[in-house]
Protein backbone atom coordinates (compact mmCIF):
# COMPACT_ATOMS: atom_id res chain seq x y z
CA UNK A 1 0.00 0.00 0.00
CA UNK A 2 2.83 2.41 0.89
CA UNK A 3 4.53 1.68 -2.43
CA UNK A 4 1.30 2.41 -4.33
CA UNK A 5 0.95 5.72 -2.47
CA UNK A 6 4.53 6.71 -3.27
CA UNK A 7 4.11 5.78 -6.93
CA UNK A 8 0.86 7.74 -7.10
CA UNK A 9 2.52 10.76 -5.51
CA UNK A 10 5.49 10.47 -7.86
CA UNK A 11 3.16 10.38 -10.86
CA UNK A 12 1.23 13.40 -9.59
CA UNK A 13 4.41 15.39 -9.01
CA UNK A 14 5.89 14.33 -12.35
CA UNK A 15 2.87 15.62 -14.21
CA UNK A 16 3.08 18.98 -12.47
CA UNK A 17 6.80 19.77 -12.56
CA UNK A 18 6.39 22.98 -14.57
CA UNK A 19 6.01 24.86 -11.29
CA UNK A 20 3.03 25.84 -9.25
CA UNK A 21 2.35 28.99 -11.23
CA UNK A 22 1.97 27.05 -14.49
CA UNK A 23 0.18 24.14 -12.88
CA UNK A 24 -2.81 25.74 -11.18
CA UNK A 25 -5.05 23.13 -12.73
CA UNK A 26 -3.01 20.42 -10.94
CA UNK A 27 -3.03 22.03 -7.50
CA UNK A 28 -5.66 21.00 -4.99
CA UNK A 29 -6.80 22.23 -1.58
CA UNK A 30 -5.33 25.20 0.22
CA UNK A 31 -2.61 25.68 -2.38
CA UNK A 32 -5.16 27.24 -4.71
CA UNK A 33 -5.86 30.07 -2.28
CA UNK A 34 -4.14 33.42 -2.43
CA UNK A 35 -1.12 34.32 -0.35
CA UNK A 36 -3.19 37.07 1.25
CA UNK A 37 -5.31 34.24 2.72
CA UNK A 38 -2.26 32.68 4.39
CA UNK A 39 -1.50 35.94 6.18
CA UNK A 40 -5.16 36.36 7.22
CA UNK A 41 -5.32 32.77 8.49
CA UNK A 42 -2.17 33.19 10.55
CA UNK A 43 -3.43 36.38 12.15
CA UNK A 44 -7.06 35.49 12.85
CA UNK A 45 -8.23 32.01 11.93
CA UNK A 46 -6.42 29.27 13.81
CA UNK A 47 -8.34 26.38 12.22
CA UNK A 48 -7.81 27.65 8.68
CA UNK A 49 -4.12 28.28 9.39
CA UNK A 50 -3.76 24.75 10.73
CA UNK A 51 -5.21 23.26 7.54
CA UNK A 52 -3.16 25.53 5.28
CA UNK A 53 -0.03 24.61 7.25
CA UNK A 54 -0.81 20.91 6.89
CA UNK A 55 -1.20 21.42 3.14
CA UNK A 56 2.22 23.14 3.05
CA UNK A 57 3.91 20.37 5.03
CA UNK A 58 2.39 17.77 2.72
CA UNK A 59 3.61 19.70 -0.32
CA UNK A 60 7.16 19.92 1.04
CA UNK A 61 7.12 16.28 2.12
CA UNK A 62 5.97 15.21 -1.33
CA UNK A 63 8.69 17.30 -2.92
CA UNK A 64 11.30 15.74 -0.60
CA UNK A 65 10.13 12.27 -1.57
CA UNK A 66 10.39 13.19 -5.23
CA UNK A 67 13.68 15.14 -4.99
CA UNK A 68 16.22 13.95 -2.44
CA UNK A 69 18.22 17.19 -2.82
CA UNK A 70 15.70 18.87 -0.53
CA UNK A 71 16.31 16.53 2.41
CA UNK A 72 19.66 17.97 3.58
CA UNK A 73 18.23 21.49 3.57
CA UNK A 74 15.26 20.39 5.64
CA UNK A 75 17.64 19.04 8.27
CA UNK A 76 16.38 20.03 11.70
CA UNK A 77 13.83 22.51 10.37
CA UNK A 78 10.37 22.25 11.84
CA UNK A 79 6.97 23.00 10.42
CA UNK A 80 7.01 26.39 12.13
CA UNK A 81 10.19 27.29 10.19
CA UNK A 82 8.45 26.52 6.91
CA UNK A 83 5.38 28.47 8.02
CA UNK A 84 7.54 31.49 8.84
CA UNK A 85 9.16 31.38 5.40
CA UNK A 86 5.74 31.23 3.73
CA UNK A 87 4.44 34.09 5.91
CA UNK A 88 7.36 36.30 4.87
CA UNK A 89 6.94 35.36 1.21
CA UNK A 90 3.16 35.81 1.22
CA UNK A 91 3.41 39.15 2.99
CA UNK A 92 5.60 40.37 0.12
CA UNK A 93 3.61 38.62 -2.64
CA UNK A 94 -0.08 38.69 -1.64
CA UNK A 95 -1.22 38.37 -5.26
CA UNK A 96 0.38 34.93 -5.66
CA UNK A 97 -1.10 31.63 -4.53
CA UNK A 98 -0.04 29.57 -1.54
CA UNK A 99 1.13 26.96 -4.07
CA UNK A 100 3.36 29.56 -5.73
CA UNK A 101 4.85 30.36 -2.33
CA UNK A 102 5.36 26.66 -1.55
CA UNK A 103 6.98 26.18 -4.96
CA UNK A 104 9.43 29.01 -4.23
CA UNK A 105 10.18 27.50 -0.81
CA UNK A 106 10.95 24.13 -2.39
CA UNK A 107 13.19 25.78 -4.99
CA UNK A 108 15.10 27.51 -2.20
CA UNK A 109 15.43 24.24 -0.27
CA UNK A 110 16.80 22.56 -3.40
CA UNK A 111 19.39 25.34 -3.79
CA UNK A 112 20.37 25.06 -0.12
CA UNK A 113 20.71 21.29 -0.48
CA UNK A 114 23.14 21.52 -3.41
Image: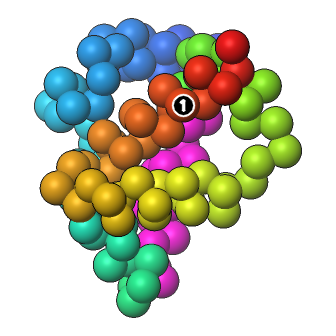
Quick one: which residue is furthest to the front in this view? Answer: 92
Q: Dominant secondary structure of the magenta stretch? A: helix
Queried whether the magenta region covers residue 54, the answer comes back as yes
* Res 1 → quadrant: top right
Relative depth, front residue between 89 and 67: 89
Q: Position of residue 33 (x, y in %)?
A: 23, 57
Is 27 on the left or on the right of 6, as rendered?
left
**How many numbered dots are placed on residues in this image?**
1
Residue 55, above or below 69: below
Relative depth, front residue between 27 and 110: 110
Quick one: which residue is furthest to the bottom in this view? Answer: 44
Q: Tell me the residue that label 1 is attached to.
A: 108
Which residue shows up at 21% across the image and 32% down it? Answer: 21
Queried whether the magenta region covers residue 52, the answer comes back as yes
* Res 49 → quadrant: bottom left
Residue 57, above or below 84: above
Q: Position of residue 16 (x, y in %)?
A: 30, 18
Magenta extent: 46-61
Amino acid sequence: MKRLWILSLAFFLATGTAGAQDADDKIFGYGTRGCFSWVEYENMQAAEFFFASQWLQGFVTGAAIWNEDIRPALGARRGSDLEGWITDYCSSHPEQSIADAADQLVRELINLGD
